[in-house]
Image: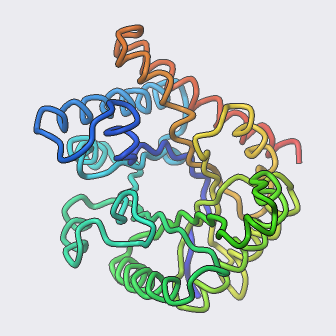
Amino acid sequence: MNLGYNKPLYILPFDHRSSFEKGLYGWTGALSQEQTDKIARTKDVIYDGFKVALRKGVKQENAGILVDVQFGKRILRDCAKNGYITCLPAEKSGQAEFQFESGDHYPSIIEDYNPTFVKTLVRYNPEDDEQLNRRQAGRLRELGNYLHRHGRYFMFELLVPATVEQMERLEGDHAHYDRELRPSLMMGAMKELQSAGVEPDVWKIEGLDAREDCVKVAEEARRDGRDHVGCILLGRGSNPQAVIEWLKKAAGVPGFIGFAVGRTTFWDPIVAYRDGKATREQAAEQIADNYIAWVNVFKGAQTQK
């Protein structure tokens, strides 16, 4: 089995859609062209921050962005021109069940924008609805097979939301769920998906509180000959200290190659920019410094293991 991506990978993700429409600007319903352009310009500021980070020394071969077609067309074009690592989301935003953003036309979108990775965000709990899980796995297998036939990498963002029954069992304690139950459910989900023929090159994983859980998750990602499959941590929009702790736990674990931390990197700077409290240049500089901080924490913790 010749799968995987095993080089250091530090992703700045800003493929969020509803977070920008509703969370940042408070808009609902269909967007006007003016509103669409405003979100696109805001995402340009985040891209500026990425380029500042490269100028400040983050290695281009390890740095990448994740941005959507809806608001990031010109960014994706510019990245391709500059040879940057790009990740393109395939999922329709905000759906409980994985659906292709562009329906059956996803191959033409992928070929048009030529990303390094195609990423899917999937909510999958192995103790949830079996038919739902089977439907999702079928679509994801189709996508993964297409990508590998065409020499592209498959990035899989696995979210494992608790079921109602699980939360009742834990008396509504989300912290207990994250600490005690979610790690084993993540591994169960990964095994089920692999058994269904879904073969990511990189798993995008929610932060884990225990290093031994990082080890077990990475081992699951690499089982049965998947020796080059990588794992990266996502930030969950958490506070900087939580992100730092997750990075430190995972750094140095064989199989964990980096991170994809989005909102914790860019949210406060773009809110300041939106409110006129920071210039575009100041916001970009702060985004760059936040991103560089994650790189330094991850690399620094690796050397201490």
Where's the N terminus, which quadrant?
A: bottom right
Q: Residue at x 71, y 80 (%)?
A: 188
Relative depth, front residue between 262 and 62? 262
x and y, in percent, of residue 69 in the image: 25, 52
x and y, in percent, of residue 223 in the image: 73, 82
Q: Residue at x 73, y 35 (%)?
A: 297
110 displayed left or right of 132:
left
**Residue 193, above or below 255:** below
Q: Residue furthest left?
A: 33
**Residue 85, above or below 224:** above
- Total number of numbered labels? 0
Residue 272 falls in which quadrant of the image? Answer: top left
Q: Residue at x 37, y 77 (%)?
A: 147
Color style of the picture: rainbow
x and y, in percent, of residue 68 in the image: 31, 51
Relative depth, front residue between 48 and 272? 272
Relative depth, front residue between 22 and 246? 22
x and y, in percent, of residue 161 in the image: 62, 64
**Residue 95, above or below 128:** above
Q: Residue at x 34, y 26 (%)?
A: 45
